[in-house]
Amino acid sequence: MEEVKEFIKNCGAYFLATVEGDQPRVRPFGTVDIFEGKLYIQTGKSKNVSKQIQSNGKVEICAMDKSGAKWVRLSGTLVRDDRREPKVHMLENYPELKSMYSPDDDNTEVLFFKDAEATFYCFTAAPRTVKF
């Protein structure tokens, strides 16, 4: 899990795919961290992405490194964690978000991956998969 987090974090941005009815939805994201042994991301409850995740928690992330030669696909189910502690942790690791989010507002949402599978790809090697 640490390897997955570091790879995604080093990419800077990644793309999160959700579904809305029968329509795929993809958008860039930037938050990823580990808290209490789980991989988390962060968004706002008022956003469409949050509503899509609550309707169907199955998502996929794709991130490519800066060289363009390696990428990871991470799939799993996102689960909302409404506790204050993971929100504080995420905002401490992404202080630039503190102007928009607070652990005490009704909008900040942190979600962790359940039943996750990450596959690392490279043009010069066979894919490698890790589960957590």
Image (cartoon, rainbow, N blue to C red):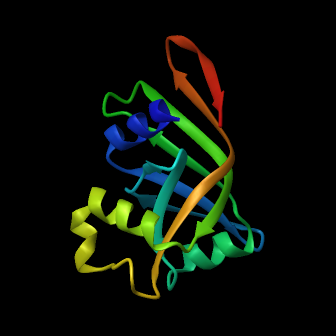
Does 93 sit left or right of 33 as displayed?
Answer: left
Question: Measured from the top left, where is residue 64 in percent x and y?
Answer: 43, 37
Q: Identify the residue at horizontal 39%, vertical 84% (top origin).
A: 104
Instruction: Please state which of residues 52 and 117 is positioned toward the viewer in this rendering.
Output: 117
Q: Identify the residue at horizontal 40%, vertical 87% (top origin).
A: 105
Does 126 sit left or right of 93 as displayed?
Answer: right
Question: Measured from the top left, where is residue 37 in percent x and y?
Answer: 54, 44
Question: Measured from the top left, where is residue 128 in percent x and y?
Answer: 61, 20
**Residue extending furthest toward the right:** 22
Whether 106 is drawn above or below 9: the answer is: below
Q: Identify the residue at horizontal 61%, vertical 69% (top origin).
A: 80
Whether 24 is drawn above or below 123: the answer is: below
Does 120 sit left or right of 76 as displayed?
Answer: left
Whether 94 is drawn above or below 70: the answer is: below
In the rendered view of the protein, which quadrant contains the C terminus? Answer: top right
> How many labels, in total?
0
Instruction: Please state which of residues 13 and 46 is positioned toward the viewer in this rendering.
Output: 46
Question: Measured from the top left, where is residue 121 in percent x and y?
Answer: 54, 25
Residue 127's image quarter? top right
Instruction: Please state which of residues 12 and 39 is positioned toward the viewer in this rendering.
Output: 39
Q: Identify the residue at horizontal 59%, vertical 42% (top origin).
A: 74
